[in-house]
């Protein structure tokens, strides 16, 4: 009889999570480690990273922090090759990073041209380059791996600006362009590397609760069929599924985890 729960296990797997210290990245890292994987948390804040590593070591989770800047485009391919060489393999690569420029904090729909170009470079291009690089390494080493790129509901549909009414918040046009690009590039590489047994999917979260403006939260929840914002652990569960053998026949999909936002 098939042991279905075992298909969700990641024992003996090495998983790399870019942006592994973020709101979603942390939960993804914990979920992967609980499933038996050795998790490489790739992020830029060394102090926070070592603290996160120590906290989880005390919980008997195999999580290792590695200082890694995915936005360093010129060194990205070399850094990934070095990482792969050091650990001998990488079975799962999760692009959960959210690199952005300092002016991204400004509540404007449009950034200036220089900022637009830089954000496309450090976010969209870093996801594309890292996906290509890790897929090639998997192919060369005959690893039937899984790559999961974080898209967004706003890479699939246009923003509903009504949810920002009564707040100073908004949504950047560059964000939609970047996430839309990530989603379609994920389809491309899923088709290209499918023959090598490498699965590549785009996971698209809806709004995740993070103590946002209460007016925004109320507006968002009213617009969503499940009438609430998402939780970081709900995204982590979906990533775990896509990473595991439970999703062995799933590739090239745009996996929505959005409380039904995009169904209406």
Image (spheres, rainbow, N blue to C red):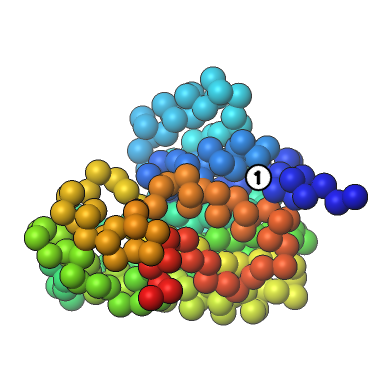
Q: Is residue 176 visible?
A: yes
Residue at 48 percent of width and 24 percent of height: 54
Tag count in the figure? 1
Residue holding disc 1: 14
Q: Position of residue 215 (x, y in %)?
A: 16, 54
Q: Is residue 122 above or below residue 66?
A: below
Q: In this view, which residue lies farthest toward the top?
A: 58
Quarter of the rendering containing residue 102: bottom left
- Is 59 in front, or is 197? 59
193 or 258: nearer the viewer:
258
Rate crowding at label 1 as few (under 14), some (14 to 19) or many (20 or more) other CA atoms within 10 Å. many
Q: Is residue 70 left or right of residue 217?
A: right
Q: The residue tagged with tag 1: helix, strand or loop?
A: strand
In the picture provided, is 33 more to the left or to the right than 114?
A: right
Q: Is residue 55 above or below residue 71?
A: above
Residue 200 percent across, percent down from the top left:
60, 67
In-image side of 74 versus 202 (left or right): left
Residue 35: quadrant of the picture: top right
Residue in the picture at 45% in, 41% down: 26
Report the residue at 86% width, 51% height from top: 2
Look at the image and tell me whether residue 129 can be seen. no
Q: Between residues 162 and 249, which one lies in front from this camera angle? A: 162
Q: Is residue 235 left or right of residue 3?
A: left
Is residue 47 depicted above or below 32 in this figure?
above
**On screen, residue 97 above or below 37:** below
The quadrant the C terminus occupies is bottom left
The residue under the point 20% across, 65% down is 163
The location of residue 209, given as percent across then percent down, is 32, 48
């Amino acid at each position: 009889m098939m042991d279905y729960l075992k298909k969700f296990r990641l024992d003996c797997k090495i998983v790399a999570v870019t942006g592994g210290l973020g709101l979603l990245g942390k939960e993804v890292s914990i979920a992967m480690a609980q499933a038996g994987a050795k998790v490489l948390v790739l992020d830029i804040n060394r102090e926070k990273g070592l603290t996160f590593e120590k906290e989880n070591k005390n919980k008997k989770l195999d999580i290792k922090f590695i200082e890694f800047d995915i936005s360093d485009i010129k060194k990205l391919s070399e850094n990934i090759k070095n990482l792969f060489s050091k650990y001998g393999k990488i079975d799962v690569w999760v692009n959960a990073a959210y690199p952005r420029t300092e002016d991204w904090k400004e509540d404007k729909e449009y950034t200036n041209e220089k900022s637009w170009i830089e954000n496309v470079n450090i976010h969209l291009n870093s996801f594309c380059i890292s996906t290509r690089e890790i897929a090639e390494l998997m192919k060369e080493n005959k690893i039937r791996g899984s790559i999961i790129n974080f898209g967004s509901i706003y890479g699939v549909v246009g923003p509903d600006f009504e949810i920002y009414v009564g707040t100073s918040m908004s949504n950047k046009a560059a964000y939609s362009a970047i996430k839309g690009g990530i989603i379609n590039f994920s389809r491309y590489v899923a088709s290209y590397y499918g023959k090598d047994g490498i699965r590549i999917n785009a996971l698209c979260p809806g709004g995740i609760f993070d103590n946002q403006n209460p007016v925004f939260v109320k507006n968002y929840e009213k617009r969503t069929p499940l009438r609430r914002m998402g939780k970081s652990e709900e995204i982590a569960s979906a990533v775990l599924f896509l990473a595991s053998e439970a999703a062995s026949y799933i590739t090239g999909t745009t996996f929505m985890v959005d409380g039904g936002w995009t169904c209406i």
